[in-house]
Amino acid sequence: MPIAYLPAERIFHLRSRDVSYVLKVLSSGLVAHLYFGPRLRSDSLTSLLSHFDKRHPADVNQADYAGELDILPQEYPSFGLSDFRSPAIEVRNSDGSSLVDLRYATHVITPGKPRLSGLPATYVEDTEEADTLELVLVDALTGLEVRLLYSAFRDHPAIARSVRIVNRSNAALRLERVLSSSLDFKLVGWDVVSLSGTWARERHYQRQNLASGSFSIESTRGASSHQQSPFLALLRPDTSEEHGPAYGFSLAYSGNFLAQATVDQFRTTRVLMGINPFDFSWLLEPGEQFQAPEVICVYSRDGLGALSRSFHDLYRSRLARGRYRDVERPILVNNWEATYFDFDADKIESIARAGAEAGIELFVLDDGWFGKRDRDNSSLGDWVVDSKKLPRGLRDLAERINRLGMKFGLWFEPEMVSPDSELYRAHPDWCLHVPNRHRTEMRNQLVLDVSRPEVRNHVVDAVCRVLESAPIAYVKWDMNRPLTEMGSAALPAERQREIAHRYVLGVYEMMERVTARFPEILFESCSGGGGRFDAGMIYYMPQAWTSDDMDPAERLKIQWGTSLVFPACSMGAHVCSSPNHTTARITPLETRAAVAMSGVFGYELDLTKLDVEERTTIKQQVARFKEIRRLVQFGDLYRLRSPFQTEEGAWSFVARDKSEAFVMYVSIRCEPNPPVTVLPLAGLDPAADYAIEGTDQRFGGDQLMYAGLAVPRLTGDLRSKTWRLRRVSPAR
Ligand code: DGJ
């Protein structure tokens, strides 16, 4: 059992692969957090309390901490007693007070891991894979029950945490804050890593030293956002890609979130994560429950690289679901940047034909196929094919594409409505709005109030009707604006601040229904590029569009940052045209492909406009990617040179059994008369020799890792080089 309970000391020792997580019920019933880090042998760990408490160790267990909760590392801190740090929970009680006093009531340890009702979460396929501790804390006066859930994984260095609140009283309570996890760390001096950016510049790596006070990131936009990602890592100042301790916290949630790291007066660092309390309030009637989303906490003793590989393994195999989870993803061509809204069936078929000739496997018809959508100012909500552009309908087009030997995919934006649409004219109250207030349009559209079951039913029916009407093998589920005027015509005044979370629950319910009904379809989520690229989405859709920016110089950074948490098989990565539509940068086709080959590879340009040489190159690229696809999408990623610290970017994918590797290097800016660039590789078998494809060179894995690989001179900006390595001698 990965979870041990020591009744004498009332200690719970959760053991995941290589990791221990320890908590203790004190004599007062308060629950202290004792440890999270490399695996410990002993269960008898009460002495760890003295790391926080100066009293004689013999007295520590008897202390009730009344008046001094500020020094106690707690599992689920509240406010109103003597812990003055940010709490995990805040409640308005029926008497108007906000005091919450949680004490241990009972616990249960069960094999396996329960699903979270209505929310995405990591899962197990066999009860042997994890144990779950459910720790029940109660506020005896108000009847508030807090159930802390912890799952320890046998095969992953991860602990999944979530919280369920139950109102056991006779009066309504108002939840003002229900964070999913709180963790207090003793060691002094942490760096915090976050992933920040904006549209076309998502998830840039950002690292800074934590000093006394708070560091926090959040979203208030209704989606997890382009601006901040629901992820934080804590590193020791000398932790690097390959060395040193690293903790990662990733929230499986796609809406407003808060992630915060606070260093207090005694230099304890508290990391909090969960639904953003800002503009959140939830009325909990007697007997009702509230389930908060899951935080996945991962520990690595071997740097940020190993932390990422652990997230990749877990998310690839026990967060993503469905038929495509373990399957190599089709190479696609998407018409968005090729045509925007200006296409007809013949144009689409011509692009698809060029794609088929290159060996591309899937054609994706993007925005503009429905209603009268010749611009972005109409028809969202009217999911009926545009008979001007596609007079013979979707089935005919899909079959034409199928006859070319390609599958057919389709774009939707199900959560939105255009004011100029039949749907809006029929149901003007179906969008998020506040009565008598202006409805803010962004990209000329409004957001459907999917907290309402009738709206969800309509959307699901409309999408399913289209999916049934033609042989559709792939869906891109887009979402192109943040939420404003967050109000619902269907909720009473006292529940209006529930809307942001109810919206997310509504999206999840729709995604569950549509994906369950069409298990053969590959789904990709999207939000104006990577505005909702989070662990919540990966549960429903195994891949996501990483960014609208396909310029390889930008993508190096975006994909590097995204790879901190998410595996290559989840990252949509396409070759664009040059000059790039976002940056106007001119880049070699070879480099665009080298970078895009580190994800779910595809093209997004008008293939019919390429010359013969370019078409031949694309054919070779497609063939090349088919050879390395399994390695990239299901191998181990090693980040080798950071585009955030150098004018270069490099990473590699290494097979699990170390039998092969694919290395990608880009020189972003050419330096005149430069020294020879040497790239130390990582993750190879030091005892084996590797042959470099296309050459007669062979090197020891040790040499390639410790001395490095010499990069040939590359002249010009944004030049790239890739290598394929094959093990030629067995490990000794
Ligand atoms: C935003 C997406 O990120 C793009 O790829 C494209 O699908 C457009 N929306 C279409 O409106």
Image (cartoon, rainbow, N blue to C red):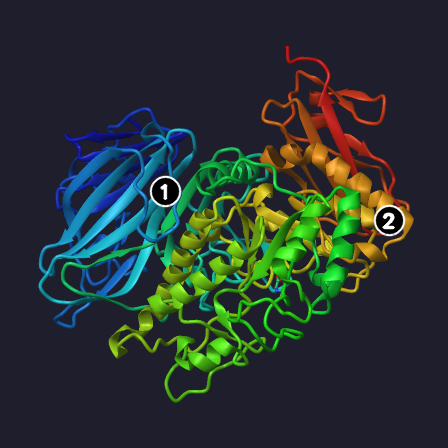
Q: Position of residue 615 (x, y in %)?
A: 85, 47
Instruction: Write down which quadrant ligand 1 falls in.
Output: bottom right
- Residue 160, disc: 1
Whether the residue under disc 1 has CB within 8 Å of ligand 1: no
Q: Nearer the viewer, mark 2 or mark 1?
A: 2
Look at 9% across and 55% down and name the residue there. 140
Which of 352/67 is in front?
352
**Side of 555 where 158 appears, left or right:** left
Where is residue 275 shown, x and y percent of the image? 37, 60
Most foreground residue, 265 or 552: 552
Q: Residue 82: horizontal and vertical position, in percent?
A: 21, 59
- Look at 42% across and 79% down and name the residue there: 427
The number of numbered discs placed on residues in the rendered structure image is 2
The image quadrant of residue 585 is bottom right
Q: Which residue is mark 2?
A: 614
Depicted 449 relative to depicted 506: above or below: below
Instruction: Answer left or right for 59 relative to 345.
Output: left
Q: Are marks 2 and 1 in contact (CB under 8 Å)?
A: no
